[in-house]
Image (spheres, coloured by chain):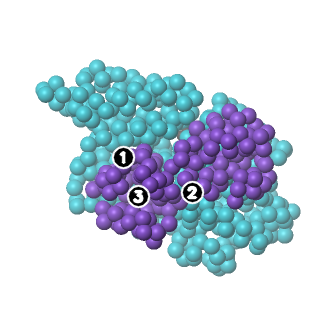
Amino acid sequence: MLEKRILTQRFNKYDGLSIRQYIDLDGFKALEKAFSMSSQQIIEEIKLSQLTGRGGAGFPTYIKMQAMLNETRDKYLVCNADEGEPGHFKDRHLIEKDPYQLIEGMVISAYAVGANKGYIYVRGEYNNAIQQLEKTIKIATTKGYLGNHICDSDFSFELVVRRGAGAYVCGEEFALMESIEGKPGRTRVKPPFPTEKGIFDYPTLINNVETFCNLPTIIEHGGEHYSTIGSNHAKGTKLICLSGNVKHKGLYEVPYGTSINDVISELGGGTANDIPIQMVQIGGACGPIIPPRLLNMDIDNEAFEIFDAKMGAGAIIVIDENYDLFEIVLRNMQFFLHESCGKCAPCREGHIQIVKLLQKFVNYQATHKDYVSLQSLAEVIHTTTLCGLGQTSPTSVISTMTYFKEAYDKRINQQNKE
Amino acid sequence: MNLQKILEKHAFQKDHLIEILIDLQNEKTYKFVTEEEVSLIADALKVPVSHVCGVMSFYTLLSFDERGKYIIQVCKDVPCYLNDDFNVLTTIEKALDISCGDTSKDQFFTLEQTACLGCCDEAPAMRINNKVYTKLTKAKVLRILEEYKEGILC
Ligand SMILES: Cc1cc2nc3c(=O)[nH]c(=O)nc-3n(C[C@H](O)[C@H](O)[C@H](O)COP(=O)(O)O)c2cc1C
Ligand code: FES
C-alpha cells in the first residue's frame, strides 16, 4: 500500500459535524493526554517527531513553538487556511471532512505555547469550509473543548474564523496578519518575525492547517513513533493534491519518501487516455516544472531544493503531451501578475513584462533577445522582491529554461522561419 | 440586515473591516458597496475613508461596481485548463451573449474569471455566488445556467 492514512483516517467515517462521532473515533484523546503534560514536554514531543510546516516552507514546527513559549505577553495562534496556490485542495478537505481534528490540533498548540485567542483565516471562496468551521467551533465550545476552562482545566482558548476576500498573497504570513487586522494584505519588512511581533504587535504563532492536524497523532502516539514514518529527509505523511491529466485526480496521503512517479502511476492511474507525460509541475504555480526523467524523485522537501524551490504544499500537476509548455508557463505568470500586491517594484512591474514576453513565445513571435530578457527578468524578480510571492513566482520559467531549453530554442527558430 | 446591524454584529471593531464589507456586499442583490456606505463605515469605525477605499480596492471579492444578481466565476488556472476540453468560458459567453467581465442587460448574470477554487480534483470548476460547481461538461454548464434563469437554482 502506497497510502498511509493518518490525517485522513476519519474521512467519510463521520459527517464532519457530529462531535459525538468524532469522539467515538478516538477524537480528543490526544488533547486529554496533552493536558496531563507540561508545555515543555509537548514541545519536546514535537521536536522528536521532526514535524515541519506543511504550508510550503517546511520550517521545523517546534522552533516556532519554543520561541512563543519564551514570550510572556498575550499571545495569538493563527491557522493559515488561505490555500490559494493553484493545484491545492488539501486544507479544504481537512476542514470539510474532519474539522474537529484541526480544532484539537489548535487547542494542543495553544495550550503548549500559552495562547488564549486563535484565528482561522480561511479564503473567502471556501464557503462550505467557513460554514463548517463556524458550526463546529460552536459545538466544540458548547461541549467544553473550546472557550473557558477547556476539559475542566485552567486553560481557556477562544477560536474565531476570519474570511479572506480574494487575495492569494494573504497566504503569506505577514500579509495574512495585516489582513486579520483589517488592512490590505501587503507584506511587512522582516524581521521582526511573527513570534516576536505578530497580530496587533503581540507574539503570534502561524501554522498551516495540515501542520496543526499532525499534532493530535504526535501527542497520542509520541514524537519518536511519528519520526519512524517517512524518509531520511522528512518525517510523517504528506497530503498530495494530484491533478491535471491523470485518470484519478484526488487527495492522497503518503509517507515522505514516496516517489512522484509512484503517486502518479499507482494512485493516479497514469495519464488519461495513456498519452505520454510531457512534464509535471510540483507545488503549484510557484513550483518547478520537471521532465518525466526526474519523476523518480521523492516527495521530500530536501530533495526538492532545486531552484530554491521546495516541494511546496503538496500539489502534483500532470501535463501530457497535448499541451503547449508556453501556454502553461504563461498561465502561471498571469496568475502572479494578478496576485502581486504591488508594494515592491520588481514584482509589480516585472510580472507585467514577463507576461508580455511569454505571450510572444505562445504566439511564435519570440526572438533570442526575448529569451535573454526573459531569463534575466526571472532572475531579477526571484532575487530582489520583498516577499515569497516574487521570490518563487519565476520558478516555472527558470525550471523550464533548464529542463526544456530545446523547446525554447525550437520556438525561437520557428519564428525565424516564418 | 442593514449596515447598522452589521456594524453592531462586529461591535464596531476596526479589525473587522473586511468582514463588515463582505457581509454588507452579500446582503445586496447586486453585490457592491457604495461610496456613501464607505464613509458611513469609516465614521463608525473611526478610520479614514481612504483606508476603507484601500481595502475595497485591494481585495478581489469586494466591488464598487454594481454587478449581476448572480456572479459566475470561471476558474482560469492550470489544473482546470488541463481538464477543460470544451472551454467553459466561451460556452458561457455564447450562451449569455456577454463577454468575460460584463453583466447581462437584465443584470441577472455577471461573468468573471477567478483564481483556483481549490477543486482541481474535480476540474473544471466554476463558482456562482457562494456555490461551487465542478466536473463541468458543456451540457452541465448550459443546464446550470438554465436552472438559474428558471429559479430552480438560486
Ligand atoms: C505568496 C505566499 C503565499 C502563501 N500561501 C500560503 C497558504 O495559502 N497557506 C499556508 O499555509 N501557507 C502559505 N504560505 C506560507 C506562509 O507564509 C507560512 O510560511 C506558513 O503559513 C507557515 O506555516 P507552516 O510552518 O505550518 O507551514 C504562503 C507564502 C507565500 C510567500
Ligand atoms: S485550478 Fe481550477 S479549481 Fe484549482
Q: SS class of the residue under badge 1?
A: loop
Mark 3 vs 2, N-terminal side: 2
- Locate the N terminus of chain A by quadrant: bottom left
Q: Which residue ends up furthest to the top in the rendered image? A: A369
Label 3: few (<14), some (14–19) or many (≥20) C-alpha neighbours in 10 Å: many
- The residue most toward the front is B106
Q: Is mark 3 within 8 Å of ligand 2?
A: yes
Residue B149 visible (yes or no): yes
Residue B99, disc: 1
Residue A89 visible from this viewpoint: no
Q: Amino acid at mark 3?
A: Ala
Residue A46 drawn above or below residue A169: below
* Residue B29, numbered label: 2
Q: Are the residues tagged 2 and 1 within 8 Å (C-beta)?
A: no
At numbered mark 3, what does the secondary structure look like: helix, strand or loop?
loop
Q: Marks 1 and 3, Cα distance to the nearest angstrom?
A: 18 Å
**Which numbered dot is residue A398?**
none
Say which residue appears at 63% left-offset and 78% top-offset. A21
How many C-alpha atoms fall within 10 Å of the one at disc 1: few (<14), some, or many (≥20)?
A: some
Q: Relative to B5, say whether A376 is above or below.
A: above
Q: Is residue A381 above or below residue A161?
A: above
In the rendered image, residue A44, in percent from the top left (x then y), is placed at 71, 53
Disc 1, ligand 2: is the CB inside 8 Å?
no
- Identify which residue is drawn at 73% across, 43% down: B40
Q: The disc numbered 3 marks a residue on which chain?
A: B
For label 3, the residue is: B125
Q: Residue furthest right?
A: A154
The chain whose colour is purple is B
Q: Secondary structure at mark 2?
A: loop
Q: Chain coloured cyan: which letter? A: A
